[in-house]
Amino acid sequence: MLIPRRLLFSSSLGSSAQLSPAGDLLAFPRRGASGSQGIWVKPLKGGEMRQVASSHDVQTVVWAADGRHVLYLEDADGDEQYRCVAVDLEGRVRPLTPRGLQARILGVSAARPDDVMVLLNEEDRRRHDVYRLNLPSGRYERVAVNPGNVVGWVADSALAVRAALATTSSGGFQLLVREDEDSGWNRARSWGPEEHGHPLFFSAAGDTLYLIANHDAETNRLIALDMKSGRETVLAEDRDYDIVSAVQDPVTGVPQAAVVSAERSRTITLDPAIGEDLAAIRDAMGESFRVFNRSGDGRVWLLSSISDRHPPACYVYESESRRVSLAIDDYSEFDRYALSRMEPIAFRARDGLLLRGYLTLPPGQGKAPGPAVLKVHGGPWARDTWGFDPMVQWLANRGYAVLQLNYRGSAGYGKGFLAAGHRQWGRRMQDDLIDGIAWLVARGVADPARIGIMGASYGGYAALAGLSLTPEAFAAGVCMFGPSDLMAFLRNVPKQWTSYRSLLHARVGDPEVDAEALEGVSPIKNYRSIRAPLLVAHGANDARVPCAETDRFVSALRSAGGTVDYLVFADEGHGFTRPENRLHLCARIEAFLASHLRGECEPEEEGAVHAGTER
C-alpha cells in the first residue's frame, strides 16, 4: 500500500518542541488543518493545544526566561534573513528585530528573565555582533563586537558574553575567553584545520566552560575548562564516535550526561544523581531518545522518541514519579502502513577506509535485485543518523532500496575521517559513493541498470558529479540546490558566511590556488559527459548557491543534448520549506524516478497549488 505523500511531507512537528521554564507548557511549531504553520502551545495537564502565532517558516523556538513569551525565528522567502519574533500566551505577536537582517537567538537566563541575547548583522552584513535585547521595551544594545572572524559566541548565566569561537587564516579555530564584558579577550585554545572544537555553555557559577573538541584525541570529547587555571578535564569520550551534545543540569549548569551519535544515538550518564532518571527513561523508550530541554528546577524533562519506523513523538518525564507519558503524537495514521527498517551497514572503500551508513529495503523485497537510490546527505560536514527519515520511507515504500552512506568527510567518526575528505570533492568522496553502489550490486540488492542518485546542497553536487564523472554508474539523477560550479561557489560566499571563508578554502579548495583542480570536478565543466536524465530543483532566493548558476548549468546541458527537467520555486531559498512546494517537488521526483527506474508512483493531486515553475 502506498503511503500518501501528504502524510509524509506536510507535517512539521518533531524537532523543535520546548518546555516552559515552569515545566507546565509546551511550545512547538506545527501546521494546522489549513496547512499554515504557526506556533502552538499546549498545557501538560489539562487544556487543549492552541495556536498563538502564524508564520510561514519557523526556524527556532525558544521560551523566554519569563515563561510568558515564546521566541522564534522566521524566514519569509527562503533568503535566510531571519527575523526574531516574540509571541505572548495571549497571542500578541511582536517582531523584535528588523527585516532584511539575519538574527539568531543566543540565549536566555532565569537570572535576567526580561532579557534575550541575540546575534545580528546590523552594523556589517558580513558579521554577527551580540546584542542584549530587553523584552518589555524592545530596545537592544550591542555588547560584543565581532572583529570579522568570530563564528560563535557563548554567554554565561548572567548573560555576559564570555567566550567566542573564531576562525584562523589557516582554516582552523581558536577559543577566546574573558573574565567579564569589561575585560579583554584571551586565547584559551587553538585548533588546526585537521581538528575541531566549539564551546557549549558555562556552569551557573561561571567558573567552568564546557566544550566539545578533539585535540589530543581522535574523536570529539566533552571537556570542562577551568576559567581561572586553564586546566582541562575530559568528562566523556568514545573511541569510535564523536560526542555530539550534553544534557545540562538547569540549576547548576553542569553536564549530567553526554550524547554519542554512534550507529544509533546513545546517552552516557555522567552524574549519578540522574542515573535512576535515565534508567526509567530507557525502560520506557529504549536507548534511542532525545532530551529537548528540562524545566528550570530539573524535575520535568521533555523528550523525543527516536525510531526508524515512526516519526518522532514528544514525551514528558517527571522525576518525582519516574513516569514517562506521551505529550504529542500527530502521526497515528502511520500505524496503517508497513514501514521499513533502517539497518546500519559498514564496508571498506577501495583504499581500505572503513565506511558506515544505513540501508533501507522496500517492505517485502524478494531476493531478485531491484531499483535503488543512493541518497547523499548535504553538508558535507554532517552525517546521516539512524531514525525516521520521511524521504527514505517514501522511496522504500515506492520500491527502491535506499543507501545512505557517510562518505569520508562526514562528521561524527573522528577527525581523521573528516580530514580524509579535505579537498576531495568529486574525488575520493565521490569514489566512496561509487564503492557504495558496487557494494549494493555485489550483495544482490540493486539492479545495476536501475540505480539513481539524489541529494540536496552538497548531496546535489554529488548527484551532478556522479552523472558527469561516472556516467555509466547511474540511470537517473536528482539535484536539489546543489552547486555546479565550485569556483563560483567559493568566490560568491554569502556575506554572512565571510567568517567561514578560510575554512572553506582549507576543506574544499582555494579558487586562487586550486583553480585547475576545482574546475576538474565541477559539473559545469563536465556536463557533456552526462548521459542519464536529470531532474534539477532550485529556490529562486537561494543565498548560498545562486539560482543563476544553476540556470547556466541547465542551459549548457540542454545545449549539449542532455535530458533535464528544471523546477524553480519563487518563494524558496536553500531548502524547500513550504508544504505545498515540497509536495509538488516530491510528486515530480516520484514520477521522474518511476519513469527511469520503474518504481511505483502516486499520481499528483489535481489542482495542487505551488510556486514551482518550469525553466
Image: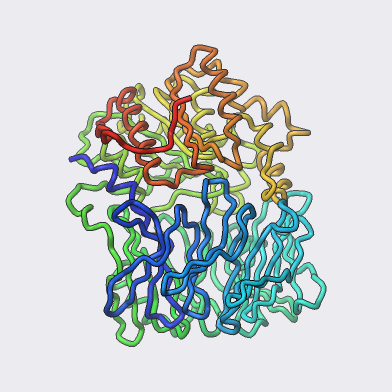
Numbered circles on residues, count: 0
Q: Position of residue 294 (x, y in %)?
A: 44, 77
Q: Is residue 366 visible?
A: yes
Q: Position of residue 184 (x, y in %)?
A: 82, 73
Q: Which of 228 and 118 lies nearest the eye of the viewer?
A: 118
Using residue 107 as the reference point, say whether residue 361 is left or right of it.
left
Name the residue located 73 percent from the left edge and 76 percent from the top edge. 230
Please tell me whether residue 356 is drawn above or below residue 129 in the rendered image.
Answer: above
Please tell me whether residue 21 is drawn above or below residue 290 in the rendered image.
Answer: below
Q: Is residue 191 visible?
A: no
Q: Position of residue 285 (x, y in %)?
A: 30, 68
Name the residue located 44 percent from the left edge and 47 percent from the top edge. 577
Quadrant including the N terminus: top left
Toward the right, the furthest residue is 184
Give residue 373's quadrant in the image: top left
Q: Position of residue 537 (x, y in %)?
A: 47, 33
Q: Which of 138 and 466 lies nearest the eye of the viewer?
A: 138
Q: How is the image coloured?
A: rainbow
Using residue 327 as the reference point, say whether residue 127 is left or right of it.
right
Using residue 389 as the reference point, say whether residue 471 is left or right of it.
right
Please tell me whether residue 482 is drawn above or below residue 329 in the rendered image.
Answer: above
Name the residue located 53 percent from the left edge and 67 percent from the top edge. 94
Name the residue located 32 percent from the left edge and 43 percent from the top edge. 360
